[in-house]
């Protein structure tokens, strides 16, 4: 009712202003009757299909507020959309019909000898590709696509080349177009266009190739055969970030899983250019695509040192604290893969400190990478060891071990890093104490328990050996149950080696030789045996027969550590008697002639100690044997050792130092070459006619 009242009110007001009302009331009445004679259906039809209204005729609506459409007007919207769609369909068909009729003539014109004609034809085809209907018709004509390719590669006119390249680029946004381009054999021509002096041609060519590499089967091999990599790598010298982003992704697509492509990139100085980009640009998409290429190259033994020498470690380290998680993760994986080739690299102080701080992350991938990188960078590098130790690395690594739980990818590199930090640098003793002070010994000892993952066990045994070098750690190690666990591991590993027999055949489990476990456990027990209480516990576990048996091992290092632990155990009279009762004298006498100075010295010390309670004649024979075998070139030296042994139970000074050298993590990457999907927003829109220099 309210709407009707408003309608009548507006009608009267409007009529007051008309000459009809002023001139003749009778006419007004007739007009009103005509308006009311319109049926509701007519008014609805007029609202929904205004084109049906006779010219000059008007239909008043009940709209009270111009800003608020009436219900009828709202109902009319779908019909108007339908009308628009129908118009578009008609136009679409018109475009398709036009293209269909034009294709034969355009194909001929593109092959014309007159370059002006070819240019005009290429321009027309380029315009046709702007409309979807005509574009679909064009891509269904192999003759036309081939003509465009020939025009592009044969013309000397840059504008013609630009139009032709633009046509191929437009077609490459549909799968049918990609197939048409591929079947036309245009990839070699597109690769040649990468040397064009016109930047728009260059951009069209690289983007078309990029679309082919992403979506067209067989395109990668075709680009490689056309020497595409040799043309693409020099393009890394360009300065447009968006162009570089597409180029680097092409390199990633071509080098992923293909060793030959990686070597071609190396031969064309690709690593240096990629590192330069990482160091000097801040466009996130470019940094991300470049890091992906470097990640693929970082598993190549030939590219790895080239990336490191170009400053790749430092350049990648710049992006570990940024806001882009995907970039950070790629940089971490790449650094992890490169790190075993960067153990002698200088200038990594900032990177090491960042890595220590990242050990507090809850992200498993970040933790895996950070521990792996630290493990390798502290390998045989005293400066890095000292820096990490002084930066709180020991505590952070212990917390990483605690959080790792059963995740071997974190536990193994974390323990390896701790093993490196606790030996062979000026702050090694500080690190050994720090492990104890931060309650790391119980957590480390637990890693020796079941179930065994042998790489973790191997690293843990070496760490325990280093920790035992600190006298203050001897009691905590004993109290945490380290000794029985080491003995059990030793027995298990020895049984495995015995089961497979001796000789050249070695026993592997999880990629670890059981002989290494035997050597490691025996060496750790040797250092633990320096403590009298530990010595008694080791002997009480019936280990002496096994140690004597190990003197016959074909592995020289096992002979050395076995002689070493027997040397410590022989300090106790009861243990010395047990060693002698097990028949150790015979193998020890033989070991006196070993070319290994450490083995010979340990054997001499054990023989001397087990002969202390023998008769004077026996001791004299032993002394003569020792003099003739061990010190035949310097008899006076044995006399000095004899005096020293009688004066002191600590034989460290006369024993050559031994222990585990730092071992880098395996050079193989922790993650396989996992291909990441390319981000769609990186693609180039052919409708944007923008110069390269104006791209944001």
Image (cartoon, grey):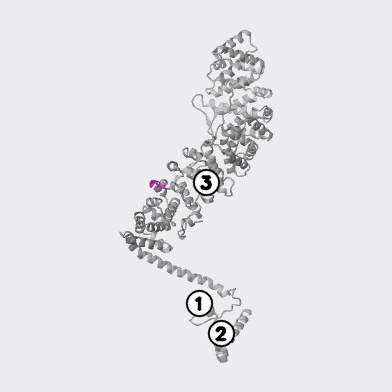
Q: Residues within 10 Å of mark 3 (few under 14, many from 20)?
A: many
Q: Residue 471 — which label?
A: none
Give the residue pinned by disc 1.
Answer: 50
Q: Residues within 10 Å of mark 1 (few under 14, many from 20)?
A: some
Residues rendered magenta in the picture: 224-228
- Side of 443 relative to 688 (left or right): right
Which sits in the foreground, 641 or 32? 641
- Side of 330 relative to 261 (left or right): right
Does residue 670 appear in this view? no
Does residue 684 appear in this view? yes
In space, the residues marked 1 and 2 are separated at their CA atoms by 19 Å
Q: Residues within 10 Å of mark 2 (few under 14, many from 20)?
A: few
- Side of 543 relative to 298 (left or right): right
Instruction: Verify CB contact (< 8 Å) between mark 1 and mark 3.
Output: no
- Magenta stretch mostly in which secondary structure? helix
Residue 127 position by quadrant: bottom left
Q: Nearer the viewer, mark 1 or mark 3?
A: 3
Give the residue pinned by disc 2.
Answer: 36
Give the residue pinned by disc 3.
Answer: 278
Residue 110 screen position, x and y as percent = 34, 60
Using the image, determine if residue 89 lies above or below residue 468. Answer: below
Q: Secondary structure at mark 2?
A: helix
Residue 15 screen position, x and y as percent = 58, 86
Residue 25 screen position, x and y as percent = 57, 91
In the picture as drawn, the residue positioned furthest to the left comes out as 113
Sequence order check: which comes first, mark 1 or mark 3? Answer: 1
């Amino acid at each position: 009712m309210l709407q009707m009242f408003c309608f009548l009110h507006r009608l009267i007001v409007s009529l007051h202003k008309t000459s009809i009302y002023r001139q003749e009331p009778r006419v007004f009445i007739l007009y009103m009757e005509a308006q009311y004679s319109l049926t509701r259906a007519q008014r609805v039809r007029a609202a929904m299909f205004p084109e049906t209204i006779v010219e000059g005729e008007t239909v008043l609506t009940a709209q009270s507020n111009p800003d608020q459409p009436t219900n009828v007007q709202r109902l009319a919207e779908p019909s108007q959309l339908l009308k628009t769609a129908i118009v578009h369909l008609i136009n679409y068909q018109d475009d398709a019909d036009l293209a269909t009729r034009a294709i034969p003539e355009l194909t001929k014109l593109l092959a014309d000898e007159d370059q002006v004609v070819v240019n005009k034809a290429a321009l027309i085809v380029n315009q046709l590709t702007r409309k979807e209907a005509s574009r679909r018709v064009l891509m269904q004509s192999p003759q036309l696509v081939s003509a465009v390719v020939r025009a592009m590669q044969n013309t000397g006119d840059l504008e013609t080349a630009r139009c032709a390249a633009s046509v191929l680029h437009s077609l490459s946004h549909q799968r049918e177009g990609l197939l048409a381009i591929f079947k036309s054999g245009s990839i070699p021509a597109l690769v040649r266009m990468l040397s064009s002096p016109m930047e728009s041609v260059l951009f069209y060519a690289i983007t078309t190739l990029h679309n082919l590499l992403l979506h067209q089967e067989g395109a990668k091999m075709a680009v490689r055969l056309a020497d595409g990599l040799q043309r693409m790598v020099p393009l890394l010298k360009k300065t447009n970030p968006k162009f570089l982003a597409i180029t680097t992704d092409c390199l990633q697509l071509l080098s992923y899983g293909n060793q030959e492509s990686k070597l071609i990139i190396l031969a064309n100085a690709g690593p240096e250019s990629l590192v330069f980009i990482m160091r000097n640009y801040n466009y996130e998409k470019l940094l991300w695509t470049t890091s992906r290429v470097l990640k693929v190259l970082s598993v190549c033994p030939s590219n790895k040192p080239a990336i490191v020498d170009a400053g790749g470690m430092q350049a990648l380290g710049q992006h570990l604290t940024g806001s882009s998680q995907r970039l950070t993760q790629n940089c971490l994986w790449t650094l992890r893969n490169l790190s075993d080739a960067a153990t002698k690299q200088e200038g990594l102080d900032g990177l090491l400190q960042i890595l220590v701080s990242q050990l507090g992350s809850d992200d498993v991938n970040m933790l895996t990478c950070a521990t792996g990188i630290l493990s390798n960078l502290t390998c045989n590098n005293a400066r890095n060891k000292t820096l990490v130790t002084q930066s709180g690395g020991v505590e952070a690594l212990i917390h990483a071990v605690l959080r790792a739980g059963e995740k071997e990818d974190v536990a193994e590199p974390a323990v390896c890093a701790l093993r490196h930090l606790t030996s062979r640098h000026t702050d090694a003793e500080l690190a050994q104490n720090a492990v104890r002070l931060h309650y790391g010994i119980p957590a480390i000892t637990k890693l020796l328990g079941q179930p065994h993952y042998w790489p973790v066990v191997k690293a843990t045994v070496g760490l325990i050996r280093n920790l035992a070098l600190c006298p203050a750690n001897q009691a905590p190690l004993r109290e945490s149950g380290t000794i029985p666990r080491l003995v059990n591991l030793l027995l298990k590993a020895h049984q495995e080696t015995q089961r497979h027999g001796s000789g050249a055949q070695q026993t592997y489990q999880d990629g670890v030789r059981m002989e290494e476990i035997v050597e490691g456990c025996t060496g750790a027990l040797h250092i633990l045996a320096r403590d009298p209480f530990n010595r008694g516990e080791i002997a009480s576990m019936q280990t002496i027969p096994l140690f004597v048996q190990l003197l016959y091992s074909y592995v020289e290092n096992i002979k050395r550590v076995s002689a070493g632990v027997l040397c410590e155990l022989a300090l106790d009279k009861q243990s010395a008697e047990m060693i002698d009762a097990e028949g150790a004298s015979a193998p020890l006498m033989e070991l006196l002639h070993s070319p290994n100075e450490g083995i010979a010295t340990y054997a001499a010390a054990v023989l001397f100690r087990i002969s202390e309670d023998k008769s004077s004649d026996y001791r004299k024979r032993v002394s003569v044997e020792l003099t003739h075998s061990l010190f035949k070139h310097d008899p006076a030296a044995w006399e000095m050792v004899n005096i020293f042994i009688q004066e002191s139970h600590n034989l460290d000074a006369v024993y050559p130092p031994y222990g585990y050298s730092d071992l880098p993590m395996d050079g193989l990457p922790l993650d396989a070459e996992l291909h990441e999907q390319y981000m769609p927003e990186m693609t180039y829109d052919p409708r944007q006619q923008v110069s390269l220099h104006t791209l944001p």
